[in-house]
Amino acid sequence: MSREPPPDPAEALPRQPGVALWREIAERLRGEIAAGTPAAGARLPSEAELARRFSVNRHTLRRALEELAQGGLIRIAQGRGSFVSEDVLDYAVGPRTRFSEWIRRHNKEPSGQVLRLAEGPAEPPVARGLGIATGAAVILLERLGFADDRPVSLAAHHFPATLGPGLLDALRTAPSITEALAATGVADYRRAVTRVTARLPTPEEAVLLRTPRSRPLLVTENVNVDAAGRVVEFGIARYPTPRVQIVFEP
């Protein structure tokens, strides 16, 4: 006959005169989060588990969690539990928005994984974005972008195939889109249009971006033009919230 495992022993908190018990619990949890246990984005133990750990009632425990939530250290999702807040990267949309510069601005290392690179006919939304005929040849570069080891963007970049000779090969070998375009004669380009919407991720997007399907994505449609005003790229990018927030700069 199997037996239930014994409950975890309650943790003894070093009581300080004049300091509320809930505040001592909040300070203990704050120190653990600062040390990386649990990690950013991780789910905290349930209220019942934490109440048993500190040998307090749920009201006292809940007051401690509310204190951490008000300070932005955790977020409380109704019906799902409490989670350690993740670092939020401000994605500043300006005339010359570049992925690597954005990530390095936050003292993180940028990297990317190419998911698809191919030439094909332009679908109507892409054709409208590029200002070309539906079915005209375009080059698609789909890329998953990382800040350190965390995925922060899933972007589909579309380029007119007539933009310059060797663009497909340049995108295959150059370390960045900026350098690939420069190799085909586009010395500089700037953001002309940015449209932002939000929606829930598809199953594939949720897996790639390591985000719950219940958490919205920020979706941007971008049009980039060269010095002469010619459209050189139409991009659709998806960013996981609350990992990324978009800030418009003049």
Image: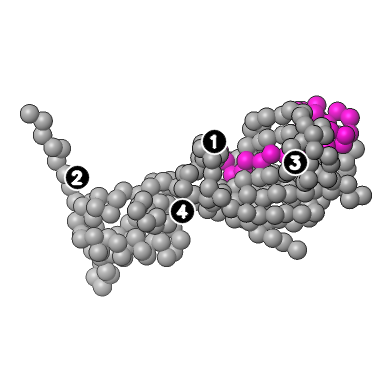
Vertically, is 51 above or below 129?
below
Amino acid type indicated by mark 2 = Asp
Numbered badge on residue 85: 4
Amino acid type indicated by mark 4 = Ser
> Mark 3 or mark 1: which comes first in sequence?
3
Tag 1 and tag 2, C-beta contact below 8 Å? no
Numbered badge on residue 124: 3
Disc 4 on helix, strand or loop? loop
Vertically, is 242 above or below 18?
above
Q: Horizontal and vertical percent for residue 45? A: 31, 48
Mark pair 4, 3: CA separation: 39 Å
> Mark 1 or mark 4: which comes first in sequence?
4
Q: Name the residue tied to disc 1.
A: 204
Q: Which residues are magenta?
A: 148-177
Mark pair 2, 3: CA separation: 60 Å
Disc 1 on helix, strand or loop? helix
Is residue 213 in view? Answer: yes
Q: Name the side, left or right, on which 30 lies relative to 21.
A: right
